[in-house]
Amino acid sequence: MGEKSNKAKEAILLLILSTLWGASYSFIKIGVETIPPVTLIAARTVLAGLILAGIARWRGLKFPGDRPTWARFLFQASLNSVIPFTLIAWAEQTTDAGLAAILNSTSPIFAFLLTLLVTRHEAVTGRKLFGVGAGLLGTCLVVGMQALGGLGHQVWAQLAIVAATVCYAGAAIFGRNFKGLDPMLPAAGSLLCGAAILVPASLALDHPWTLVPSMRSVLALLALSVFSTALAFVIYFRLVQTLGSIGTTAQAYLRVPIGVAIGILFLGETLASTVWLGLGCIVAGVIAMTLPVPPSGAQARVSDTRIRAPTPPRTRPGRRAPHPR
């Protein structure tokens, strides 16, 4: 009963995370209307990091004081916020939020490939190979067919989103190094490290004191920081510890329809027929990569078998057990 309730809780958290990150593409699209990408992402990491640091202090949590842990926070920040956040924000100046959600959904495929190449502990099965092939085909359909209609800035923006997706996959794998820490600490620590990189870049590149953002962009930035970053990161680091890297990236195929639907309903976006076909390939590939395989009957019988130590022979009352020769 307890295991079932835990699985249900993790599934609900996975759905919440998918919704928060699915909405982030539309928040970014609205934010970059009047806020430059680097400044938008710098503000996003600062606000979210301070919120999480405040909550951690209120809960009585203490940040680690050793340098190696903070070095890991910095590396995690680079993979999970600094590089991908900036690439996606830059790309969404010319790319629809729905398209960004589709391209970013391939993270489980890249997580599998990176796990296979780097740690080499991921089993290679026919189903997973099918998932990789279908996902990469879908990505090529989305990027390649669109590129035929507009070579140049548009295709580079789409490739930037794919590069951000590879970073997210690496972050999901590296995030397992924080096992044993409360999820709030790596979430807050990595965001604060990311802010330490992005704020100076924003000051040097965008001169944010000269900007006049619209109220619409400011509200999108606040929603992006509080919900799609601070809250989402706490859930993310918890799920990395409980579901693993590839299991956590399963939210990618859940957030696709959410991100696409929000873009269509609230931003009036439309998708070409080839993009819908690519979306179908990507979702099929990600599902094939992440759904658990039920054990076969033979496997179940083997797993139920227990090796037991031989029991000593019984002796009648008054008789001594035979001495082992």
Image (cartoon, grey):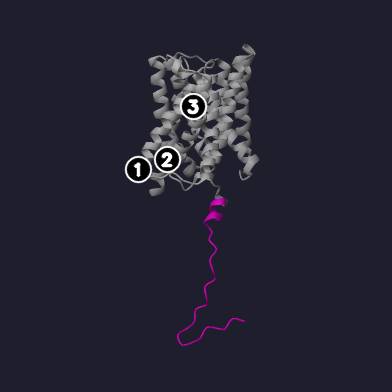
Residue 277's spot in the image, x, y percent? 57, 21
The disc labelled 1 sits on which kind of residue?
Answer: Arg
Q: Tell me the distance, in whole angstroms, between the alpha carbons under discs 3 and 2.
A: 22 Å
Residue 149 seen: yes
Q: Tell me the distance, in whole angstroms, between the alpha carbons under discs 2 and 1.
A: 10 Å
Q: Which mark is residue 199?
A: 3
| Residue 132 forms part of the magenta stretch | no
Badge 2 local density, few (<14 within 10 Å), some, or many (20+)? Answer: many
Residue that numbered label 2 is attached to: 184
Residue drawn at (52%, 73%) of the image: 311
Please state the extent of the stretch shown in magenta in the rendering: 299-325
Secondary element at image label 2: helix
Determine the main secondary structure of the stretch shown in magenta: loop
Residue 300's spot in the image, x, y percent? 53, 52
Above or below — where is 97 with respect to 50? above
In the picture, the quarter occupied by the C terminus is: bottom right
